[in-house]
Amino acid sequence: MKDKRQITVPQMQPGQSGRVIQILGGHSLVNRLNSLGIIPGKRITKVSAMFMRGPVTLQVGRAQVAIGFGMAGRIMVEVD
Amino acid sequence: MRILLMGNPNVGKSVFFSRITGVKVIASNYPGTTVGFTKGSMKLGSEEVEVIDVPGTYTLEPTSKAEEVASQMLQDGDLVIDIVDATNLERNLYLTQELLERQIPVIVALNIWDETKHKGISIDVAKLEERLGVPVLPTVAVTGQGIKELVDRIPEAIPPTLPQRTRDERWAAIGEIIEYVQTITHHHHTWLERLQDASVKPMTGLPIAAVVLAASFFVIRFIGEGLIGYVMEPLFEKLWAPLMMKLSVALGSSGFWHDMLIGNLFDGEIDFFQSMGVLTTGLFIPLGAVLPYILSFYLILGLLEDVGYLPRLAVLLDNLMHRMGLHGYAIIPTMLGLGCAVPAIMATRILESRRERFIAATLISIAIPCAASQAMIIGLVGAEGMQYVAMVYGTLFVVWLVLGLILNRAVRGFSPELLIEIPPYRRPSWRAVLTKLWMRVYGFLREALPIILLAIFAIGILYNLGVFDAIANFTAPVVSGLFGLPKEGVVAIVVGFLRKDVAIGLLSPLSLSAAQLVVGTVVLTMFLPCIAAFVVLARELGIKGLLMAIGIMLAATVIVGGLLNLIL
Ligand SMILES: Nc1nc2c(ncn2[C@@H]2O[C@H](COP(=O)(O)OP(=O)(O)O)[C@@H](O)[C@H]2O)c(=O)[nH]1
Ligand SMILES: [Mg+2]
């Protein structure tokens, strides 16, 4: 099982799950995402994405979080 | 002694606060309901203590305005009741961990306990208490379960002694705690959870949104018209009118007080729309024409809020709103604006940047008709046919859209992206919905009734003094030349600055054509907001922002009014 791929959240398929690897961004972005439970090592599932670079909805633990396309692009995940 | 209620957004702090203090506050199922803070007090033993409903925060490191307020308030508190969402323990414990590192006694309420069972979550409260080192009690704020027990244990809360840690250390500690206290059993997706996912997926979400909005619109109209037709009009026509006719005779059917209290008679009868007496039109407009729509609108809005639908709408409309310099969450203040601009403009605080708040507040004051404006639109234009009502709403919608596109280009600054937690769908509690409805309706009556009565009284006196004739002649070029309205129409526009609904009584005697009514109601809605909205606008935008917004309003009104008059 060595076929783990690193992609960004917008590249994930709806329904796909993965593990957060890192957040590419400044202190304040990392801070805001962390406070919503998006931290390296955490499993997340992509629920859906609006078309035309709209926001992405993620399942994070027990909660759902909607994230703008740009911010979502800074979250790197390793999908299974 | 001062007790702080703290916790993540949307965990039930405000409901909890109402429970222990008896102070009613608005609670809704979306993050950001409490932007300012509310104070109350409760009895603790024999002592009267102060309780504060602090805005929700995810962390004490301030990443937003609300969080700044919260971490500042922590300096002056003596004890924290940390409200935790038991269905989302892991994320919620982060704030708890941070609180435990401060030198302040903490007691934890494991709220929304009622929903843990069907979500397959089981939490060992005793173990959690042992790990955190502070009292932990399961509570259900909406029913009051567990709250008395929690209050009884407040004296046991002692300042914990956790050292300051890094973020990673805290998350690691939380991981261990969760492992130790929580077990999750697999459960089948309920239909509510399926609906939850379907309403943010574009292919299913957009049709669902269309259905929800259309259904809301029809139900609001159905209830509103039903209340008017079957309750308010019979009350006024059958009960109040005969009484007023007696008073009219007693006053000698004419003279100053007759004109002030009863107003003009039409064929010897009172016309509640046009008589313009304080006791006739003055009471009918707020109670007979506007109140039914206030009731039905806030009932439906309250349901949508408490079910948790609005944040989904924010996700679906995010794209569109970005083109207007906003992000999806701006749809919440905008929807509130369909009721009243005052709470709507205050709610723009849930938006992060100044630029967004300016654009949202300006758009709300210009293009979103409040319940009073809508009562006017439906009362005046509705009689001519629904196609004209649709024309007014259509125009306002286009104005909202186009003005948003323009402001997005013109206003400098930066609008951040959407980042919100989407709450689960919840079955709304009738108690909560009705309490909220009552607060809003009572707020309307308290604010609107005196102003309307006063306005009608002042209008009567100014008419007598001939002041309006002078104004009408002065503004005739714009009102008649540009908008194609009779010059007396300006009175309605001027008075509309006090309250929009009073204009019903001023425009209806002018016997305007359908086209003139469309122009007139659009101009009235877009022109300066009523005085109450004006005051909050000044407070939220500052004087410079307010002047800019007024400039935009006047320009937009003149352009749109003139164009409509040309087209129609
Ligand atoms: N099922 C359930 N719902 C709750 C409970 N407490 C609050 N709620 C609901 O959760 C939502 C958020 O409550 P609110 O007090 O506005 O949260 P705040 O943002 O923390 O002030 C509202 O729709 C409440 O009716 C509870 O114990 N159980
Ligand atoms: Mg609140």
Image: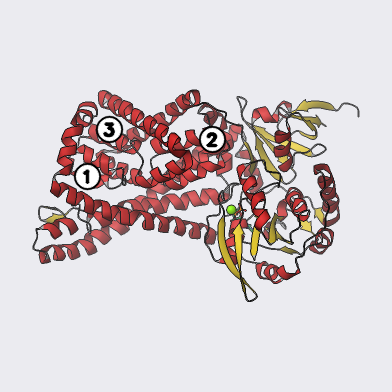
- Who comes first in sequence, dot 2 or dot 3? 2
Q: Are marks 3 and 1 on the same chain?
A: yes
Report the disc number at residue B506: 1
Q: Mark 3 lies on which chain?
A: B
Of the residues under marks 2 and 1, which one precedes in the sequence? 2
Image side of residue B365 versus residue B436, left or right: left
- Which scheme is used to colour this image of the protein? secondary structure
Element type at marker 2? Answer: helix
The secondary element bearing badge 1 is classed as helix
Given the image, on which type of amino acid does mark 2 rest?
Arg
Disc assigned to residue B75: none
Instruction: Please tell me the numbered disc located at residue B519.
Output: 3
Q: Are marks 2 and 1 in contact (CB under 8 Å)?
A: no
Distance between the Cα atoms at labels 2 and 1? 38 Å
Q: Is residue B514 left or right of residue B71?
A: left
State which chain disc 1 sits on: B
- Would you place residue A40 above or below residue B431 in this image? above
Nearer mark to the viewer, of 2 and 1 = 2
C-alpha separation, residue under disc 2 versus residue under disc 3: 33 Å
> Is B205 on the left-hand or right-hand side of A38?
left
Near-viewer residue (B459 or A22): B459
Whether residue B365 is visible to the viewer of this picture, yes or no, is yes
Q: How far apart are marks 3 and 1 (CA)?
A: 15 Å
- Give whichever of B472, B318 is nearer the camera: B472
First-in-chain label (3 vs 1): 1
Task: Establish whether ligand 1 lies closer than 8 Å to the Cβ of label 3.
Answer: no
Residue at (83, 48) in percent of width and height? B175
Which residue is label 2 attached to?
A: B354
